[in-house]
Image: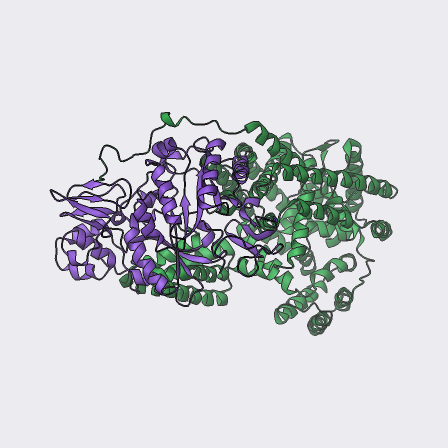
Chain colours: A green, B purple
Amino acid sequence: MPLLPLLLLALVPPRAAAGEALAGRDLEALAAEARLRSFQALAGLDLTQTETLAGLAERVAGERDRYLARRASLLAIQKATFTAFRHQNLDGGELTPLVERNTAEASHLGDKTRNEFVASLAGIDALAREVLDPGQLLLVDLLGPEELVRCALGEADRAPGEPLLRQAWGALEAVAGEKGRTLERLAGDEARQLLAVAAREGQPAWDPAAEEERIAGVLERAACLSDRAAERCRGALAREILPRTKTEHAREGLARIHAEKVLAPSTLLRLLLAEGAASILRGGEAADLTPERRAVRELEADVETLRDQISLLNLLNGLHLSRAQLAALASCGERAAAARAKEARVLPSALASIGLPPGPGEPPDGAEGRERLGREMQRLSDELGRGRLPVAKRVRRIEAIAGRRPAGPAGLSPEAAAAGAREVLAVLTPAQEQVLLDFNRCLLPPPELKDPVRVGQAGGNERRLRELALVRDVPAERYGARRAQIAEGALFRLEKLEGSFSPDAREAVVAELLAIFDEARALDDAAFAVRSAELVARLENLGLATRLKEELAGDRETELASRAANLLLDRYVPELAREIVARREQRGLPDPVDLETIAPAPSCKDGKCAVD
Amino acid sequence: MDRGRGDGPVARTQRREFLASLAGLAAIPALRATSAGRALLSLAGRDTEEAHEVLPGYWTSLPGVRTSCHVCPLDCVLEDGETCFCRTRTNRGGRLYTTAYGNPCLLAADPIEKVPLNHFLPGEKTLALGTGGCNLRCLYCQNWEQSQEKPLDLKNHDLPVERAADSLAGSDIRTIAFTYTEPIAFLEYLCDVAAHARAKKIRCVAATALFATPPAAKHLGRHLDAACVAIKAFDETFYDKVCGIKLAPVLEATEALAAEKVWIEITTLVVPGYNDDEKKLGELARWIATTLGADTPWHLARFVPQYRLASVPRTPIETLERLREVGRDAGLAHVYLSNVAPHEGNHTDCARCGARAIERLGFELLANRLAGKGACPKCHRRLAGVWA
């Protein structure tokens, strides 16, 4: 993995440092400033554009201030409820309904408020887009804010090694400066060639026709880029126009489904949300964080930490680890942390000579490190603010070091991460491995982890089965008239959970829903009991997200190793695993109940056996 | 009464609707069309020729239109119109009828491990059914919404005896499980379903607390291939205060059932503070080992707050693990932990060499390494159980 992206990740401070001030400046505010200045430098905004965007940034700031005023109280509620939830989760996951409900409501309210805030910015986003030309829009449509910094730092001389990337690079070079019908024809030709190379390289596009149209469209817009932006962003854009494979298509689909539920501001809005964005755009100083904003940041960091810890506790509880396993897992985590610290000490010393912050992804060590990081970021912002772009020589030197010391996830070398993952897997049983494979990050644990199906307990009450049972209960004389309405309702619920279908796909899904419902109704009770699992599976397979996840499902061993590595590198594992063990030891076993004192079960005594 | 809800031959019967329908005799043909309706008619004295009496020999007429039931040790004596403690058998004009017959309120395809049976066709699914009613009053009942109601007060499925087995044609299900509530409370229906099923080579199993007279237990055994008997504690006080019955008849009935060559597994739901005493459960383990055999699987199930013990916390896993050792020390070869997964106590290991023979995640079978008719994959000793 090249070091450069990781170094740039280091520009965005880790959560633990988010609230820490640096000589009056906040690291995150500094990073936001760097991102906005990078865009400014690459886009080459003229005076009118700058002034209009600055005005819009002021409006964004007004909306943000209103949102943050609400958010502060919401975060305080979330912190209180999540803390109570975490506390119960530490005791083995026996959650009281009240605490569980409060947690769900606080989380939902936070998401709802955030979605409302993002939606309130939609109008400003549209106005801002009207200001930009197609080339400038291409930058914010295709590249994220962090990528813009990476480009500004000097992608220019990045020589693509692999044939497919080289072809994409060449396509971008070919269209540069072209116009009109020549451009249209050229873009189409280049797109087709790129698809052909992708097929030859064993990375065929999932949907060639759609991909040809998409790539040609990007190429046409790329022709409008300024020379400087084209040169600096060519590498990033080349990666964006690579034909989407089946896996990438699935990942994009899942990201789209997620974005439907959790609204996220566009790249352009994220840039305008930078602290003091209007001032930065007008060439002035970036604003410092107010104490109120800093307090919100701290609350955000606390809530995010609680979310991370609760999700981890859900997993640890669901794994039903023994004390010995918990202790072993904690040791694995501690060894990984020590190794990470060791590697991080080597890396900064090597990087110090070129004056760049330590990486990869690790917080700079101590106050001195943070000061140094802050100074470097300030220098970067200043350079960008003066319209200068850093020279590529600096980047090449970084990559040379990266070539000697490839970095794995979260600061461990790939070898160390793989060895650690093996250690983690040695602690787990095969059944626990299966739980680890099935686990998804969550605030509220899913039923199978929280309250497993129990021996002898009456039938499953799963959502899909309940839905089928309800459809079966509709009287025959009403079903005919309400059939379509029932299917529409089911489609609505399906899309809410699993993502929206295209209009064409929607028609086919409704037809399948009706077929399943009709089939379920045609069965008598016994036949339905026998076949319900199959019908439920058919219903579930209709879900877009379910289908996309199936497409993504890869090799079990690789996935398991990756999840084990993530568990190893979760910085909260040692702390939480040891706390669970300590609590188990403190808790002891329940005292015996004096059965003579309890309200006894009714019994048949003195001949009084009959019930009414 | 057919509420005409579906396109298939489905009916839902509820008592209040029946009572409302009694106003008109026009309802009778419709009622005769379903087993639930027939049961209702029999109770109303309108259709006694189709009613389902309690098994002959398991009840007696007493002077003064009274009856006495002998299916379970309670020997309920009923006046005309009264219903047994189990809520399923009613005296109508001096004869004893069952309302559970043909009225399962619970019907689902479950893993056989959920019964629980770990040494009987592992990994297979079973058509599981249960009716309302039970002759126990366990304070922690996991299915109290059904067990503590009369069958006719529940929403029931229409399942004539032959339909249960017939519905399995073309599916990969080879067993019917009488479970969820107490099969002794619907013994008459169980026997008829099982007789029809076994004629079609479908095996039948049951999960039962087995508070039955020895003859009833034997009668049950003649219709079963396997059973999981819930021995809830080895403590008369617990049985009396928490379950409302006695322990001794259960042990006696279990011995009677075992004599019928039924494959038996034992389950005990461990309620923290109530029945988790090591000494007493050690005695139970030794009773199992000496009476039923050391190869008899013993399931220790984790308690989940329910019904009248909703404020009691779940059983600590440490308690279950400790009791698992108690069971092993008593000589039992297979002691399982249920309602906690993943756990080492979910798997089946060879009693001789300790090799892992079956790996499970809760009820899900992850791997079955048994060879042939249940031979250990390592030492080839045959594990006790029914494997094919």
User: Residue furthest toward the right?
Assistant: A353
Count up the numbered dots.
Answer: 0
Q: In x, y percent, where is residue A543? A: 50, 59
The location of residue A233, given as percent across then percent down, is 75, 57
Residue A15 visible in rendering? no
Residue at 58% across, 58% down: A549
Of residues B31 and A46, the one drawn nearer to the viewer in this rendering: B31
Q: Position of residue B77 (x, y in %)?
A: 20, 40
In the picture, the quarter occupied by the C terminus of chain A is: top left
Instruction: Return the residue nearer the eye: B252 or B16.
Output: B252
Query: Based on the displayed image, in which of its 4 quarters is residue B343 positioned?
Result: top right
Residue A577's x, y, as percent?
A: 63, 36
What residue is at 58 percent from the left and 46 percent from the top? A441
Residue A205 visible within the image: yes
Q: Residue at the spot x=16%, y=56% of the render?
A: B48
Name the side, left or right, on which B156 lies relative to A247: left
Position of A305 with respect to A171 (left or right) is left
Q: Nearer the viewer, residue A468 or A123?
A: A468
The residue nearer to you, when weighing A453 against B97, is B97
Q: Quadrant of residue A92?
A: top right
